[in-house]
Image (cartoon, grey):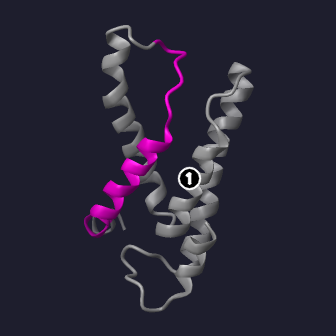
Amino acid sequence: MFIGFVKSFEPNLNQTIFPNYINSLIGGVFGYLIIWLIIFFYKKVRNKEGMGLGDAKLMAVVGFWFGWASIPFTIFISSFVALIFNVPSLLKKNKNMTTQIPFGPYIIIGCIIYVSFANQIKHMFL
């Protein structure tokens, strides 16, 4: 996290992919808080743990490295990819609705897709 924030002070970085220090700080905090809020509300509603804080830390890293604009895209794509990979197992009854599924690998896949298409994504939405 620290390296992701410190690199944002480098003036020669590609500003399309790597944000300035303000966007980096906002992205890190936003990435952590969005997952933390999901964990908090799930715990209040279901009275059990739904996700670990490792996912929140990983989203904070994504935010620090790639800015706040990467967070919504990464969460959406990682959730979509997780559905694609896990719905067939649910339909075949190999997994049930209470089976724990690690979300970290899907966050990494979403981040890689974001970095691969960052120019196109930013021109489309920003």
Residue range corresponding to the magenta coloring: 96-121
Amino acid under disc 1:
Leu
- The residue tagged with tag 1: helix, strand or loop? helix
Q: Looking at the picture, does residue 44 appear above or below residue 68? A: above
Q: Which residue is mark 1?
A: 58
Find out whether residue 106 is within the magenta segment: yes
- Tell which of 64 and 105 is nearer to you: 105
On the image, the x and y values in percent for residue 90 come to 38, 14
What residue is rendered at 38% in x and 50% in y? 110
Q: Looking at the picture, does residue 108 appear above or below residue 69? A: above
- Examine the image and state in which quarter residue 24 appears: bottom right
Quarter of the picture holding the C terminus: bottom left
Find out whether residue 31 is within the magenta segment: no
- Tell which of 96 and 72 is nearer to you: 96
What residue is rendered at 44% in x and 60% in y? 70
Quarter of the picture holding the N terminus: bottom right
Are there few (<14), some (14-19), or many (20+) residues within 10 Å of tag 1? many
On the image, the x and y values in percent for residue 17 come to 38, 73
Left or right of 39: which side holds 116? Answer: left
- Examine the image and state in which quarter residue 78 appears: top left
What residue is rendered at 34% in x and 37% in y? 81
Q: Looking at the picture, does residue 84 appear above or below residue 17? A: above
What residue is rendered at 31% in x and 55% in y? 113
Left or right of 47: which side holds 93? Answer: left
Residue lying at the far bottom of the rendered structure:
11
On the image, the x and y values in percent for residue 67 come to 50, 68
